[in-house]
Image (tube, rainbow, N blue to C red):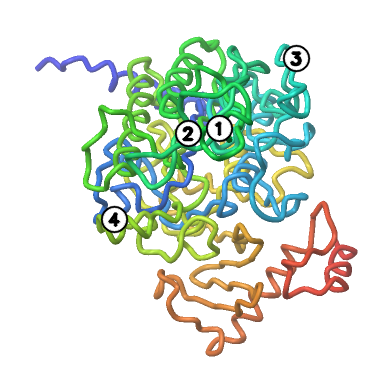
Amino acid sequence: MRLRYNGRVHARLIFIALLLLSGNLLRAAPPNILLIYTDDQGYGDVSALNPEAKFSTPTLDRLANEGLAFTNAHSPDTVCTPSRYGMLTGRYCWRTRRKTGVMGAEGTGLIPDDRVTLASHLQQAGYQTAMVGKWHLGMDFPGTSPQDRDWRQPVRDMPLDKGFGYFFGIPASLNYGVLAWFRGRHAAVPPTVFTAKKPNHRHVDYRIQPPYQQSPTATKQTLGKPGMEVAPDFIDNQCLTRFTNEAITSIRERDPNQPFFLYLPYTSPHYPVCPLPPFWGKGACGGYGEFMIETDHHVGRLLGFLEKEGLDENTLIVFTSDNGPENSWKERVEKFGHRSNGPFRGGKRSIYEGGHRVPFLLRWPAGIQEPGRRWHGLVGQTDLLATVAELIGLPLPPGAGEDSVSFADILTQPNATPNRPPLINHGANGRFAITQGPWKLIFPHRGRPRELYHLENDPGETTNLVAEHADRARELEAKATAIVSRGNDTGHWEDLTWITAAQYERAQKEE
């Protein structure tokens, strides 16, 4: 009997043989890494995680079914700037000057140039590093206002200064302006005209699209709001297509002798929800469902490209979101019966699970053992830095990734039972919580009481058990105090409602 030749299977067998001969999985062939970060996508917006979803995400389901799906994974915060900081640095953002909320498009970068990031660490290990998409961690634009911009000058304090060798993207969320297609430190078409939010006929939010005005005053006269800076060629619904095209191009044009790291933070499904016409009418969840289907389509384009190029076998794809769904999730429940937050309470900005428990899918055929697994243990996006450092065999330097705990064993050892230290959760308004095992303690804040939940029995956080389990609450409070009191860039701040300034100062001295 003759065996039919299968190039894909043959390549996999050769690859496994090399690994066995080397005796070291990762020194034999460091994985390429593709990190896809969506914006405001809830846990329930992946059909593999939500059997009741009103739209299908076949590519995301494939990542889960051919890789590893974490069902108890958390973004560092419940809005985008602090989550992006935490994921890229392995450090909670509330340790910096940013204690609440998000940045605008312009401002001193939140990541100092000497802070280790995923990109800089991988660059140190010999990776080609690139970012395509939304930054939202501060940029230093030429000039201080539209009146004194000189777009011939380079943008400073931006991704190219944080370990990325290539950048194509936009500075921040689309509602903050300074919108242009930046390549490197310059925009090919500078943001020299103005606009404001326009009605969106496919969703409850807004659009950023022509016609644009020549001055902020003209925008206010036309749309009733002061104008924000935009390039004449910028259109909101082109983001997903252009970012995916650029991502594919950056991989195609890489040096094949080096592994690559590509960070791809999409703008969807953050407002404006603006699916392209080919996706209209798809799914059963209105414009939002259409936008998620389009997002899934573009992830599928990337996976198809990697397969065609023979790169998917040893490419670690990480797919996750920066926080839970925007407030329109409530309307989707009523109108379509779709819960973007899955079985959890709350959404974006909320300290409850719906605000920070997010999709977290990994696919790596050459590295993940027994693919198709679900992992129900606690993991945070801050843990990516330590995990990647272990996978590539380059330890983090002292002072880097202070809040990062490697979960590499979960990928390579199906029977691993790591016991992660407590995870700090943080809401957009500054409210803190701590989770360890099934228990979650939420701290009092702005008139809200202390709350304790047993998440295994009560994932919807409906029954406050703080009175019945006072000892457990005190135990978790002590652990939170130890974590929160160390390694910060500032002194005591008002959101630390359970720690006095004196207690904080004593803890700082004891480090």
Frontmost of labels 1 and 3 is 3
1 and 3 marks in contact (CB < 8 Å): no
Is residue 326 something that shows in the picture? yes
Q: Where is mark 4, residue-wise? A: 338
The label number, if any, that marks residue 266 in the structure image: 2
Outermost residue to the front: 221
At mark 2, the secondary structure is strand
* Kind of residue at badge 3: Gln
Which quadrant holds residue 3? top left
The label number, if any, that marks residue 153 in the structure image: 3
User: In the image, is residue 142 above or below residue 378?
Assistant: above
x 25%, y 58%: residue? 337
2 and 4 marks in contact (CB < 8 Å): no
* Kind of residue at badge 2: Tyr
Cα separation between marks 1 and 2: 6 Å
Is residue 304 toward the left or the right of residue 160 in the image?
Answer: left
Q: Where is mark 1, residue-wise? A: 134
Circle nearer the N terminus (1, 2): 1
Circle nearer the N terminus (2, 4): 2
1 and 2 marks in contact (CB < 8 Å): yes
Q: Quadrant of the C terminus?
A: bottom right
**Label 3 neighbour load within 10 Å: few <14, some 14-19, many 20+:** few
Circle nearer the N terminus (3, 2): 3
Q: Position of residue 319 (x, y in %)?
A: 44, 39
Cα separation between marks 3 and 2: 27 Å
Circle nearer the N terminus (1, 4): 1
At mark 3, the secondary structure is loop
x 60%, y 37%: residue? 176
At mark 4, the secondary structure is loop
**Label 4 neighbour load within 10 Å: few <14, some 14-19, many 20+:** many
